[in-house]
Every structure is written in structure tokens, then in C-alpha cells.
Amino acid sequence: MALFGNRLSPRKLKAMAGREVGLSDWFTVTQERIDAFAAATEDRQWIHVDPGRAARGPLGGTVAHGFLLLSLVPFFNLSNEVFAGRIRMAVNYGLDRVRFPHPVRAGSRVRNRAVLKRIEKRGFRRVLVTVENTLEIEGAEKPAMVADVLALIFL
């Protein structure tokens, strides 16, 4: 059911519940992006920003911040069926569950798999959706991140 360009309704959203609503393109997590995130958040831990020391550390190189990965979720979700459909707006409502099972080394490619888990009506033409986001790492068995993101959608 392609909904791109169509107005979403609570009925259409309910029909999508429990299924995958998006699979993003691959995205490279560069050292430059990791460094920029470190500067923006003042989190300059050596495992993120010191390639020499990190190469000798337990992870074998620098890794992305977990919160950097989490901050990419809105970017990845712009192309999924829920948020690419015609809506008035969507606002971040919060998170129910976030886990970072596997580190993402600088230079790795990741993509997001989004599953619409829940829909809850919140007034006239407003719904609260829970989207499970699984950030996969190319070539890795475990995901980098699994996060249930809540968004209030104004239809």
C-alpha cells in the first residue's frame, strides 16, 4: 500500500499497524560526522574522537555516539510511509525504549528499518504512533540501535 502523496487517516494508519513502513537507504557514518556531533554535544570521549587511541582500544577504532545514531531517526523516517504521507505535521512525543546492542565504527554504513507498532487516537485528526526503529549495520548480525519512537501526528 503506497501512501506517498496521499492524505493519511486514522483508518489507513490502523491498516498499517504491525508492519514495516520503511526501509531507508544505506547511510555512511563518517568520522567527520562523529567529530561534529562530539563538538555539538561536548562529548569528546576518546572512543569517538581519537582514532589513534581508539585503534588500540577494545573496539578497534572510533565509534559513533549512541545519541548520534538516535538523532538520525527523524532523517531516516522522513521517507517511511507514515511520515511521507500527507499530514499537517508530526511532533516528537518521546521514546519508550532505546537500546544500543552493537557499536558503529567510523566509516560503517547503516540503514533504518521502521515498523509501525501502535496507533492511539488523541483527539480530532490526531494520533499518537509508536514506530520501532532498528538501525542495521551493513555486514553485522546485531543492530546498532533499536528504539521505539513516539510521534504525535496531526492529520
Image: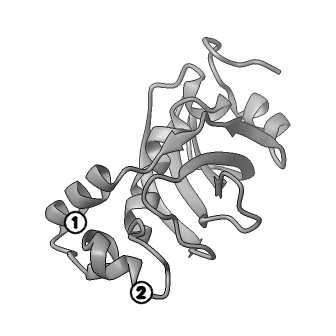
Vertical position of residue 113 compared to residue 34: above or below: above
Q: Position of residue 142 (x, y in %)?
A: 72, 68
Q: Position of residue 7 (x, y in %)?
A: 62, 17
Q: Residues within 10 Å of mark 2 (few under 14, many from 20)?
A: few
Farthest top residue in view: 5
Q: Quadrant of the N terminus?
A: top right
Image coordinates of residue 143 in percent, x first then y, are: 67, 64
Residue at (45, 39) in percent of width and height: 75
Q: Which of 97 and 55 lies nearest the eye of the viewer?
A: 55
Quadrant of the rendering where the C terminus is positioned: top right
Numbered badge on residue 57? 2
Please, what is the three-letter code of the amino acid marked with disc 1?
Ala
Which amino acid, by three-letter code, is at mark 2?
Gly
Q: From mark 2 to mark 1, how far is it between C-alphas?
A: 19 Å
| 114 horizontally vs 32: left or right | right
**Quarter occupied by residue 19:** top right
Residue at left offset 60%, top offset 22%: 85
Q: State left or right for residue 152 relative to residue 102.
A: left
Name the one closer to the observer, 6 or 36: 36
29 over 68 or under it: above or below? above
Q: SS of the residue at dot 1?
A: helix
The picture quadrant where one finds residue 61 is bottom left
In the image, residue 36 lies at what x, y percent?
21, 55
